[in-house]
Amino acid sequence: MDERNLSSLPFELAYLALLTRQGIKRLSRWERGLSAEETDLLRQAGLIVEPLERRTLLGKRVGQTVFSMRRPALDLYVSRFNRKRLSSSPGETRFKGFMFGYPSCCVEEFVRRPYSTNGIAAAGQRILFHWACPGCKTTPLLLRDYRDVYRECVNVFGGGTVPERHLAAKDESRVSPVLQALQRAALPAAAGLAAMFLLPGPARGADPHWLGAPDDADGDYLAYAEEILAGYDWGSAYTASDTILDGVHLAHVLSALIEALPETPQADQPYKFYEYMYGTETCDVCGEVINMGNVHIFNPERGLNMEFPIIALHYLEHGCLSYMGSLHDGRVDLSALKMVLMAEDESHHITYEGDADGDGLFPEEETYLGTDPADPDTDNDSVKDGPQYFEPLIEALGQVSRTPSETEPYVVEWLARGTETCEICGGVFNMGSVEVVNPAEGLSLHVPYVGLHYLAHGSAIYNGTTNDGRVLPVLLDTVLNGDGHAHWLEIENDGDGDGLKDAEEAHFGFNAAVYDTDGSGVPDGPQLANAMHAIIADLPEGERPDSTYIVNWYMNGVYPCLICGEAINMGYMEIVNPESKASIMLPYYNLHFMEHGSFATDRPDLYARIDPRDIDAVIDASSRVPAGPAAGSAASVFPNPFTERTRIVLNLPVAAAVDINIFDVSGRSVFAMRTEEAKKADFFWYGKDSAGRDLPAGVYFCRFDLGGAVLTRKVMLLR
């Protein structure tokens, strides 16, 4: 087009249009709506133009216009901000700065210290649309391009002084409308996981590049596990947009983010590297010829990288994670790409009282997990402790079975009649919840669909229009991964790892070098903790002159167990032995862990581990807890349940050969063997049948024929 036509526009709008058309700015925004004539002039200049509407905190509607040479960038911005409230949050500021093409150093400085003295001449700063940071090395290079385009724009308007009528409306004088908006709402920068819910505008019809995904119940080209990872609703094909399928939406987001990565190595942000090869391959769908090499994406701060064929970028651009070329076919690994490219989303991070370092975890959770409650990024890998802990949880959730099981974790969906909206990004979800069940732990946890969305975006706190609250991350970890022994906590000075210190084992007659002294299948520590808990549970309440008794001191308040979520009174139980005049204060929280087999707790700062010898001094448990081989322990199986192998130990009064048969629940013999004649046999069973084939998870029965006596032990195999 004849650029002189741009002289019909306000000068700064024409200036923005030229900067954007020449690629100096990825995308530009005008702080009001445009007339049909103005819109047409921009489109004649080759720009894609979209109106959008923002709202003030009081609900007033504010019109804006964005334009770009790149449809994915434009769709990303419109989907993120259209009909959303104006905000000056750091996350929104960083994202906008990224979209507008501003130097990341300038954006970060603006977030921390707006309008710092920067040493840029006033004439230079005036023609920029971002505020340069002090000592910036990038802005002086950009200024040369900005000056060239500025002079070009001045010439379009006839040279000399730009007439007053061409300046921006609302008496904005020589300060750009974009900069004035930044002064009101703070400058923007770096996109990340937030972009997962920020893309496309109108769908453009089915594309033959959209290849089907496995386990895709809602037909949106995403697998069930991928929807959970990305924070979508796997029961709705249009979570983030009314007009574009979730899988297509996600692929466009990834395409835009990868396109924006620098190609030179960086120390503090992800970058990409093209490994071109001498040769090409052809897209099986459209025939486009593409280099047969690979693209590598690096995250230096996390020490992570991944690669996939260059042809995969072609399919991402078309809206598909799968790719199919003459040499390569497959699917982009969303889990790996998410960890490398966009681990957390500041926009969904909701701060709350009690989280001193703002990393999404309570101090007691950090103590239990081994992270620093005063450092949001303990391992200094650029990802806060909370989002980093949530990463494997959200991935594990996508792998959990949806079929009820007696042995393995599974999920149950509780759909509700109605939907709710994420208050941050506007994503639409069923207002029901998912129940995660762990039979081995005897636990279950309900999480609203919108709660899983927030967790995928790195936040345990969720805020939907119907449901709001917080996912208890340690409890979710227990439900997803617990093997029935989640309360068995490791302690120091425990040589055999059975939950008792070596000196304690000697006191109770256990072998400090043997995990399970009596061969009962239960480690010494949990066995002692369970036995002591049973003794305490049988003690009478109230003062007794000649027998040990308890006095309950309840308090107004509870603490939830971090591991199982049970609400436990903050008080304590006083145990008194009137004969020895000994007593001990035992918090209910510690008593809860003893019931589950541990003298340590998950809140050591509040409830320190109790030495079982101190309890024994009051209740005299030594005389009632068996140590050494028990009469009924001729055959023991441990661990039980087990995943890979379990140890079978036979202790016989006289040397004998033993016939061992293992049966499934239908009574079918799946494994058989005969031991050598001896007083003791000790071997491992690996969950295989007699032919060496893996057996399915489930309950099995070990039968030991001792030649006149038969023993049976139940064992549970987990997969």
Image: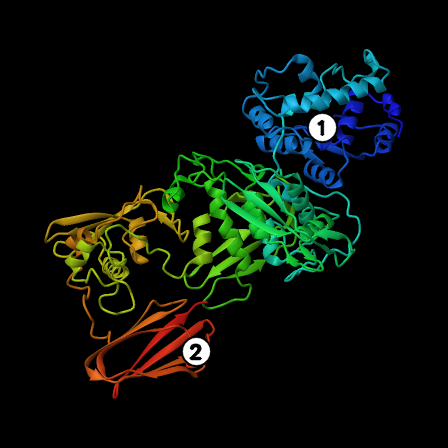
Q: Is residue 479 above or below residue 70?
A: below
What whole-number distance in Å separates the C-alpha atoms at marks 2 and 1? 72 Å
Q: Position of residue 28 (x, y in %)?
A: 73, 30
Please give left or right for residue 30 compared with residue 562 in the image.
right
Secondary structure at numbered mark 1: loop
Q: Which element carries disc 2, helix, strand or loop? A: loop
Q: Residue furthest left?
A: 579
- Residue, far top: 161
Q: In the figure, 635 relative to 266: above or below?
A: below
Q: Is residue 7 above or below residue 396?
A: above
Q: Residue at x 10, y 52 (%)?
A: 580
> Along the polypeptide, which appears first: circle 2 or circle 1?
1
Residue at image mark 2: 692
How would you rate the neighbour count of disc 2 (Cα within 10 Å): few for under 14, some for 14-19, many for 20 or more? few
Query: Can residue 331 be seen?
Result: yes
Kindly identify the amino acid type of the residue bearing the numbered disc 2. Gly
Residue 600, position as x, y percentages in the image: 29, 51
Residue at x 66% of width, y 61% of height: 217
Residue sitting at x 25%, y 70%: 519
- Tag 1: residue type? Lys
Q: Could you say where residue 617 lies in the image, as x and y percent from the top left? A: 15, 53
Residue 60 numbered mark, or none = 1
In front of the other: 216 or 416: 216
